[in-house]
């Protein structure tokens, strides 16, 4: 649903950092996720953050969470051509079984 | 490796046909989900199931039904396919959250691209 919003496109030069932003509206969100979808494939979990954390780092990926502004970002350092994909932000509320997804940001890495 | 397998990668069906999309997972997950993915709209939940024979409507259930007779299999049924159901369909599964609500990752299948002509 539209409770999670992302910009639709991002173009970045190879070697630069990419920053993908996401906003959500439900303050009861417990987990926030970033999924990656490569062309012709399903979604693959990249990383997630628990709502009581501000930041999580995993190799080239850094997730920042601003609970006050309900803003989530994913930074990819040293972006490579293999990072070209659609990136989905998703939230899980309370003990809900399901995730709510944003529309996805298509990241294009240019040489 | 966790595997969520969707029976077809590509399907072409005629308007009015009854269509079955099958999904099987091998991780003994309690929860299974059907989403459709459309450009600019992201993933929208059609139906989900948290146990055998149990189902809940998602955000866009109209025109669809589901069946969960066995834990590992979740079927999506288009009773009478229409052109506006042309889309990418994604199946996912996850464990039920534990009592502390701790994270349960959702695993996705490869998707079925359905075209209704």
Image (cartoon, grey):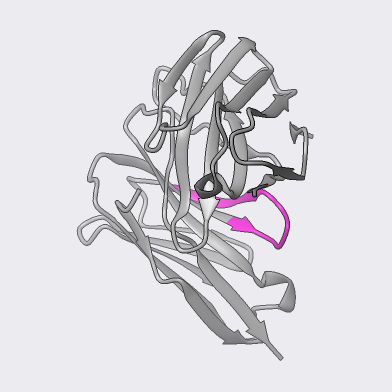
- Total numbered circles: 0
Up the image or down, A4 lies above or below B94; here it is below
Quarter assignment of residue B5: top right
Q: Nearer the viewer, residue A7 or B79?
A: B79
Image coords of residue B55 (percent x, y): 46, 17
Image coords of residue A14 (percent x, y): 67, 86
Q: Is the magenta stretch mostly helix, strand or loop?
A: strand
Q: Give the range drawn in magenta.
A: A36-49
Quarter assignment of residue B14: top right
Image coords of residue A8 (percent x, y): 45, 71
Let me know if residue B95 is in the magenta part: no
Up the image or down, A6 lies above or below B79; here it is below
At horizontal 40% and vertical 71% (from top left) the residue drawn is: A7
Up the image or down, A15 lies above or below A46; here it is below
Let me know if residue A48 is in the magenta part: yes
Q: In which quarter of the image is the C terminus of chain A?
A: bottom right
In the rendered structure, the answer to whether residue B75 lies left or right of residue B99 reads right
Q: Which of A12 and B112 is in front in this view?
A: B112
Image coords of residue A110 (percent x, y): 67, 88
Q: Which of B88 and A62 is in front in this view?
A: B88
Q: Nearer the viewer, residue A71 or A4?
A: A4
In the rendered structure, the answer to whether residue B71 lies left or right of residue A95 reads right
In the rendered structure, the answer to whether residue B97 lies left or right of residue B9 reads left
At horizontal 44% and vertical 57% (from top left) the residue drawn is: B41
For the question of whether residue A43 can be seen, the reply is yes
At horizontal 60% and vertical 30% (from top left) the residue drawn is: B93
For the question of whether residue A77 can be seen, the reply is no
């Amino acid at each position: 649903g539209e409770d999670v919003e992302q910009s639709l496109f991002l173009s970045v030069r190879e070697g630069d950092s990419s920053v993908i932003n996401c906003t959500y509206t439900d303050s009861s969100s417990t987990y926030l996720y970033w999924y990656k979808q490569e062309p012709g494939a399903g979604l693959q979990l990249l990383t997630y953050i628990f709502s009581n954390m501000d930041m999580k780092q995993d190799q080239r990926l850094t997730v920042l969470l601003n609970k006050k502004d309900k803003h989530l970002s994913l930074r990819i350092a040293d972006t490579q051509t293999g990072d070209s994909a659609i990136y989905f932000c998703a939230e899980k509320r309370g003990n809900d079984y399901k995730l709510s997804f944003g529309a996805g940001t298509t990241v294009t890495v240019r040489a | 490796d966790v595997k969520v397998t969707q029976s077809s990668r590509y399907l072409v069906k005629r308007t009015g046909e009854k269509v079955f999309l099958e999904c099987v997972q091998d991780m003994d997950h309690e929860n299974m989900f059907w989403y459709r993915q459309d450009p600019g709209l992201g993933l929208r939940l059609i139906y989900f199931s948290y146990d055998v024979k149990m189902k809940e409507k998602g955000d866009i259930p109209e025109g669809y039904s589901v069946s969960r007779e066995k834990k590992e299999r979740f079927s999506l049924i288009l009773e009478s396919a229409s052109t506006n159901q042309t889309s990418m369909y994604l199946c996912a599964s996850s464990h039920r959250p534990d009592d502390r609500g701790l994270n349960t990752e959702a695993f996705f299948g490869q998707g079925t691209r359905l075209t209704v002509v």
